[in-house]
Amino acid sequence: MTTPRGFRDRADDSLLTLLGEIPELVRNVVIAEIDAAKAWLARTAKDGGWGALWVFAALFVLFWSVPVLGTFVIAGLSSWWPVWLSALVVFFAMLIVTAVLALLGVMRFRRIGERQNPVQSIAQDVKEVRDEL
């Protein structure tokens, strides 16, 4: 006898019959869990890919908006100064900003060299233990 969902009614089965079906049921549960994990991974990868695409598109638009901002500043300054002087002022201002950002980056990279490598600390501990023996 089957139920409306297609499952067999096991009320009349013996205990040994039910125990004999445990390996198949466990196998079915494991396969179902693996299939669910594959589906989740596929959905997650798809969402991650689309998310990366949208972020890349945003960065692309931002990349091309920087020259527009520079042009806007040059146009604004050209109302007081000649256009060539406005362009030079904006160019040197951008060079100064670039130098400051690069200096901040170099200072941050120097912090990496100042830290002790975990492998070096283990080697130092082993050396100290050997020296004490």
Image (cartoon, rainbow, N blue to C red):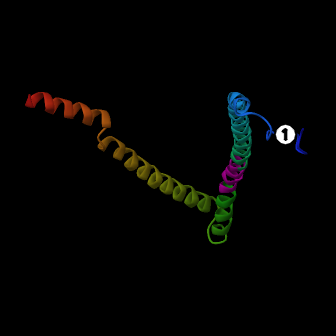
Up-down: is 129 above or below 47? above
Q: Relative to the observer, which residue lies in front, 27 or 82?
A: 27
Farthest bottom residue in view: 80
Q: Relative to the observer, which residue lies in front, 60 or 31?
A: 31
Q: In which quarter of the image is the N terminus?
A: top right
Q: Does the magenta stretch include residue 59?
A: yes
Residue 95 in percent (x, y) is at 51, 53
Q: Is residue 10 magenta?
A: no
At a point 52% along the width and 56% down the height, the residue shown is 92
Other-residue count near label 1 (Cα within 10 Å), few / some / many at <14 / 14–19 / ≥20: few
**Residue annotated with mark 1:** 7
Q: Quadrant of the C terminus?
A: top left
Specify the segment rendered in magenta.
55-66
Up-down: is 68 above or below 37? below
- Amino acid type of the residue that numbered disc 1 sits on in the rendered structure: Phe
Up-down: is 72 above or below 36? below
Query: Which of the 4 quarters of the picture holds residue 37?
Result: top right
Judged by its main secondary structure, the magenta piece is: helix
Query: Which of the 4 quarters of the picture holds residue 94?
Result: bottom right
At a point 70% along the width and 43% down the height, the residue shown is 44
**Which structural element holds mark 1?**
loop
Farthest left residue in view: 132
Residue 64 in percent (x, y) is at 70, 51
Q: Relative to the observer, which residue lies in front, 133 or 106?
A: 133
Residue 35 in percent (x, y) is at 73, 35
